[in-house]
Amino acid sequence: MDILKERIKEDAKVLDGQVVKVDSFLNHQVDIDLLNEMGKEFKERFKDEKIDKILTAEVSGIAIACIVAQYFKVPMVFARKTESKNLDSDKYESEVYSYTKGRTYKVMVSKRYLKKDKNILIIDDFLANGKAVESLIDIVNKGQANLIGVGVAIEKGFQAGGKTLRKNGIKLESLTIIDSIENGQVRFR
Amino acid sequence: MDILKERIKEDAKVLDGQVVKVDSFLNHQVDIDLLNEMGKEFKERFKDEKIDKILTAEVSGIAIACIVAQYFKVPMVFARKTESKNLDSDKYESEVYSYTKGRTYKVMVSKRYLKKDKNILIIDDFLANGKAVESLIDIVNKGQANLIGVGVAIEKGFQAGGKTLRKNGIKLESLTIIDSIENGQVRFR
């Protein structure tokens, strides 16, 4: 997706050699026009599929999933990471190991919002080692729902997540794939 | 806003006498069509104001702020609650005491996304005691930006937040105000 690549080239910052910081348009400040373009693109890429619900995880998946859901005219559900009075006790859970944070956390979805045989599209901002997306897939499977595919804005092609999903036969649509980062410069596939 | 009141009557659950659980359409599963109606309504209520940016706080403000921002054709910024590589060290901070959680947490906005004299509209899902919104106002003030007003989906009129904001001359627009909860029944103003 060219406008996203351009935006990454212009605005993203590379930290610690591996972290691509896109806080100016994706996960702190949010460029709603750009997200709408992403929404149209995901709709085009999944146009032959029946989608009943968009699934993502808090925090940084919410904005993109919200805008994308408009193009599929379906509700969006975001998996919660913390227990809350607003979360049913009757829920699907999965554990995620975060390399960035060096610890395991849970993602949770109320059973009321993930029903058997419903067609689910997972949307997230980043795909790196894939652990977060795998936990959402685990939740879809626990609910006996039907995973249609996974759409991410930015895939880090030099980490294992995308390869693993494709190897497992999952329809993965990445709007951009970063193949390498060298001397602070991002190279796209 | 009648469709929101209807939805609360139909779908919300009252917990512990005081908590209004709206996880079926606002803060776990998200009804994007309903959020779009809210966006139109906020635009109407602030139609005479110049707005440069929408400000909210993670987690549950993001979805509504994202959709609302579309109607103002401006970017949205969500205050972060946890330190992250994706957050600049040069930031505005404020502390919030959470009655629900019984502890204090920080909200943080990068200085790059809150500039002097810019016109800010704060959007959030709930207004109860008002501590979360007050911390966002504190951040707006620290950045010497210009607070245009505050828009919330659901104000708990029996808690102090709304009264305090209005007393301080802040333009507060609540799409619904719950005046009391008795025997699990919500009564609107």
Image (spheres, coloured by chain):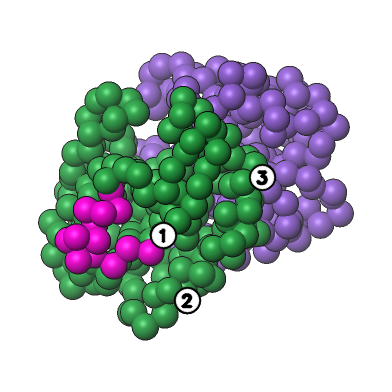
Chain colours: A purple, B green
Q: Determine which residue is flagged by label 2.
A: B44
Q: Alpha carbon of mark 1 to alpha carbon of mark 3: how far?
A: 19 Å
Give the chain letter at badge 1: B
Q: Determine which residue is flagged by label 3.
A: B10
Chain part drawn in magenta: B161-173
Q: Name the amino acid type tagged 3.
A: Glu
| Disc 1 and disc 3 in contact, CB within 8 angstroms | no
| Disc 1 and disc 2 in contact, CB within 8 angstroms | no
Judge from the rendering whether residue B113 lies leftward or rightward of residue B169; answer left or right.
right
Badge 3 or badge 2: first in the primary sequence: 3
Q: Residue at x 28, y 48 (%)?
A: B161
Question: Which is more foreground, mark 1 or mark 2?
Answer: 1
At which x and y percent is residue B59?
Answer: 43, 41
Q: Alpha carbon of mark 3 to alpha carbon of mark 2: how far?
A: 26 Å
- Label 1 neighbour load within 10 Å: few <14, some 14-19, many 20+: many
Q: Is residue B164 magenta?
A: yes
At which x and y percent is residue B120?
Answer: 29, 66
Q: Name the amino acid type tagged 1.
A: Ser
At which x and y percent is residue A13?
Answer: 34, 51
Q: Is residue B111 above or below residue B181?
A: below
Secondary element at tag 1: strand
Badge 1 or badge 2: first in the primary sequence: 2
Task: Name the foreground residue: B138 vs B155.
Answer: B155
Judge from the rendering whether residue A163 lies leftward or rightward of residue B93; answer left or right.
right
Question: Which is more foreground, mark 3 or mark 2?
Answer: 3
Badge 1 or badge 3: first in the primary sequence: 3
Asked if labels 1 and 3 share a chain, the reply is yes
Q: Determine which residue is flagged by label 1.
A: B174
Q: Is residue A151 visible?
A: no
Q: Alpha carbon of mark 1 to alpha carbon of mark 2: how far?
A: 13 Å
